[in-house]
Image: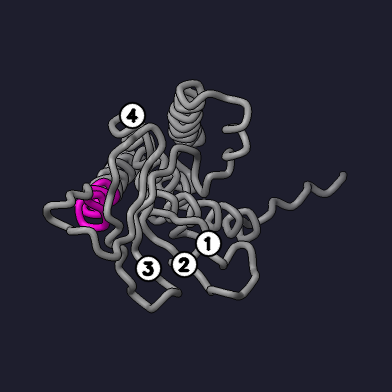
Amino acid sequence: MTFYSVLNGDFLAHRRRRILVFFGVVAALLALDLGIKYWAERRLVERYRPETHGTGSLMLRQFPGEKTLYVDREIKVVGEYFTLTYVRNYNLGFSMLAFLERWMSPAALAILMKSLQLSATLLVAVYFFYTGLRWWVPFTLVVAGGLGNVVDRFTRGYVVDFVKWSIPGSGIPLLDPFPVWNLADACITAALVSFILLFFLEPKQKAPKPD
């Protein structure tokens, strides 16, 4: 068994087995992603209550459209370089369409984000089955990651992000800090890397020799 065969799905000989594995892996990753987000929303942030938290030095924050203050309970895993922190992302992964906030209202932007994520996830799933369930690893990761953020978008109105990498003072845009992300984003990123690897690893068909 080669690395290419694992990514491509050749080791799953029968289509029925591929379908079962696809839905099983998607369900497992989706449950894990939503479970961690549920934990992050209850462990990394909480509503500020003066009678409970007092008026000392606290990291307080507000979210768009809310007047409620929240207490930030960031967890430092490796100093300032790797932390778990609570972020609400009203945009797409890594806030890549944040520039649209200048021209669109929050309600219109929310509808656009839901439509884009749901449509993209469904199109990827349909194309995966259309191609005969080939390249199952990247397609499975894309669908699982897409659904994880789509469920967030429709149930919460935003996506919960919680992992932050940073090299303070480095001056490197993507590392000071790197955009906060979640497991679903990691699945989609891993899928893109897998697609690139498969593109270069896939055996090229030789052109037929002229008679």
**Residue 64 spot, x, y in % from top left:** 41, 37
- Give the quadrant of the N terminus: bottom left
Q: How is the image coloured?
A: one colour
Q: Tell me the mark number nearer the camera, choosing from 1 and 4.
A: 1
Classify mark 1: residues with Cα within 10 Å, few (<14), some (14-19) or many (20+).
some
Q: Is residue 171 visible?
A: yes
Q: Which residue does the image show at 12% across and 55% down from the upper left?
A: 52
Residue in front for this viewpoint, 184 or 210: 184
- Give the quadrant of the C terminus: top right
* Prevailing secondary structure of the magenta residues: helix
Placement of 9 over or under 131, stated as above or below:
below
Q: CA distance from mark 2 to mark 3?
A: 7 Å
Q: Which residue does the image show at 36% across and 44% down from the upper left?
A: 62
**Residue bearing the label numbered 3:** 83
Q: Which residue does the image show at 83% across and 49% down from the upper left?
A: 209
Q: CA distance from mark 4 to mark 3?
A: 27 Å
Q: CA distance from mark 2 to mark 1?
A: 5 Å
**Residue bearing the label numbered 1:** 178
Amino acid on which the number 2 mark rests in the picture: Trp
Identify the residue at the far bottom of this view.
79
Residue in front for this viewpoint, 81 or 49: 49
Numbered range of the magenta stretch = 32-46
**Residue 24 spot, x, y in % from top left:** 26, 45
Judging from the image, what secondary structure is the residue with disc 4 in?
helix
Left or right of 119 in this view: 18 = left
Q: CA distance from mark 1 to mark 3?
A: 11 Å
Marks 2 & 1, CB-CB < 8 Å contact: yes
Q: CA distance from mark 1 to mark 4?
A: 26 Å
Q: CA distance from mark 4 to mark 2?
A: 27 Å
The disc placed on residue 165 is: 2
**Residue 174 spot, x, y in % from top left:** 60, 62
